[in-house]
Image (tube, rainbow, N blue to C red):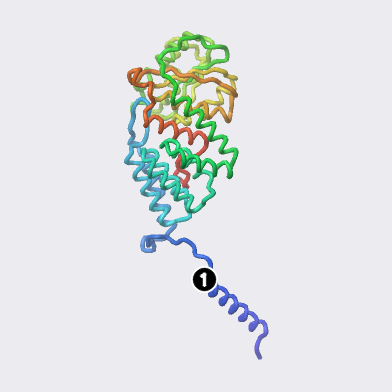
């Protein structure tokens, strides 16, 4: 005698099988474009690729000048290639595309980066972050029509982000056109601060000559304005020393009261200089600040502090700059394309857009 439950179950299974067969063409998901089966498993391969990228990211090999201390360009080329290889395995992981695009930005290859941001939109046409990047980098390149088009889409998708980006562009335009001076020709008002940006220490933990030049300029202005708070910021350790601690001690040894000085010993970049030090400005209700760095770096520093304080305050703070000259003063008056690219790149990071956000590969 047939079991009615068994017959019913078989009928359901047959119906489901027929339904699945009839709809095989209804949806087609993206599949990996390379054969990975012989390489272990897909997940293991992707994890291994990200581990390779992290190892390169943590490499000690760096290139430095007075306004820029960063990974070697070849490091970023390798990271971009690795992330694109990972994307071929995982074509829905657009974070790999963002990372590869930003690595190309780091190397100054904005055309390739724009191509990769556009590829994100092929997957997610309404991706807010992709429209922000495309608005910004087309603007940097002078592609007004393309920039305006992406900004229009951004305003429809996320009006607050569009307004934030307009503020960022206003700040960038202001700093890009500012004259560079190595003097402060007026007394600072009350509730003022002097902000001095660090510079990578020598391997033995001693201060680089470029950093000492910045401190000498700081000392000059601190003596002219004995009421001003002093903020020194830099936290990349070398031989158990940090820039912030050494900068503070140098100023104390030159006669500056330690109670005037706040040392940030955590910032690893100009972006973090701004993000970590802004709360000392807010805590002391600073209304006017003088930012001191090398001449080729002060514009970027000012832009990042102004962007950072839009979020945290103090509201309405005025920031001016004084340069420790790393180039002749007349040569510094026109912002270079490389410096402007650095201003755009780090301004977007300060706005909250990470360079890398793929698993262990973080900023």
Residue denoted by label 1: 24
Q: Is residue 203 above or below residue 256?
A: below
Residue located farthest toward the bottom when viewing the structure as drawn = 1
Q: How many discs mark residues in the rendered view?
A: 1
Tell me: residue 115, above or below residue 322: below
Q: Which x, y percent locates residue 272?
A: 48, 31
- Quadrant for the C terminus in the image: top left
Image x and y of residue 163, in percent: 57, 35
Looking at this view, is 296 or 333 the one in front? 333
Between 165 and 274, the residue placed more toward the observer is 165
Q: Looking at the figure, which quarter contains the N terminus?
A: bottom right
Check the image and name the residue furthest to the front.
Answer: 145
Q: Is residue 82 above or below residue 226?
A: below
> Can you tell which quarter of the image residue 283 is in?
top right
Q: Is residue 165 left or right of residue 62?
A: right
Residue drawn at point x = 42 percent, y = 42 percent: 102
Residue 209 seen anywhere in this rendered image of the structure:
no
Q: Position of residue 208 (x, y in %)?
A: 35, 22
Mark 1 packing: few (<14 Cα in 10 Å), some, or many (20+)? few
| Residue 47 seen by the camera | yes
At 42% across and 12% down in the image, what residue appears?
Answer: 183
Q: Position of residue 46 (x, y in %)?
A: 42, 54
Q: Could you tell whether 280 is left or right of 87 in the image?
A: right
- Residue 111 versus residue 325: which sits nearer the camera? 111
- Where disc 1 sits, the SS reads loop
């Amino acid at each position: 005698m047939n079991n009615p439950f068994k017959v019913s179950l078989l009928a359901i299974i047959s119906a489901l099988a027929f339904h699945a067969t009839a709809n095989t063409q209804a949806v087609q998901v993206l599949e990996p474009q390379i054969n990975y089966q012989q390489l272990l498993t897909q997940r293991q391969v992707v994890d291994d690729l990200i581990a390779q990228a992290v190892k390169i990211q943590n490499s000690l090999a760096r290139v430095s000048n007075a306004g820029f201390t960063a990974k070697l360009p070849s490091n970023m080329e390798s990271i971009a290639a690795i992330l694109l290889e990972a994307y071929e395995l995982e074509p829905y992981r657009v974070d790999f595309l963002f990372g590869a695009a930003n690595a190309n930005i780091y190397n100054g290859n904005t055309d390739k980066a724009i191509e990769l941001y556009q590829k994100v939109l092929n997957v997610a046409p309404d991706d807010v972050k992709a429209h922000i990047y495309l608005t910004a980098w087309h603007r940097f390149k002078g592609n007004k029509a393309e920039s305006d088009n992406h900004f229009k889409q951004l305003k429809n998708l996320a009006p607050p982000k569009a307004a934030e980006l307009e503020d960022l562009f206003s700040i960038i335009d202001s700093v890009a056109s500012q004259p560079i001076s190595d003097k402060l020709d007026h007394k600072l008002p009350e509730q003022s601060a002097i902000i001095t940006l660090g510079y990578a220490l020598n391997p033995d933990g001693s201060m680089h000559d470029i950093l000492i030049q910045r401190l000498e300029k700081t000392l000059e202005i601190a003596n002219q304005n004995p009421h001003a708070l002093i903020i020194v910021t830099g936290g990349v350790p070398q031989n158990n020393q940090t820039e912030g601690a050494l900068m503070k001690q140098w100023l104390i040894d030159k006669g500056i009261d330690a109670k005037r000085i706040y040392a940030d010993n955590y910032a690893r970049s100009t972006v973090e200089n701004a993000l970590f030090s802004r709360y000392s400005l807010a805590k002391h209700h600073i209304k006017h600040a003088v930012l001191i760095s090398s001449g080729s770096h002060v514009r970027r520093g000012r832009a990042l502090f102004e962007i950072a304080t839009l979020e945290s305050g103090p509201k309405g703070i005025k920031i001016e700059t004084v340069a420790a000259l790393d180039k002749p003063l007349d040569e510094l008056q026109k912002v270079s394309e490389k410096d402007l690219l650095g201003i755009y790149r780090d301004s977007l990071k300060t706005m909250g857009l990470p360079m890398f956000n793929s698993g262990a590969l973080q900023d």
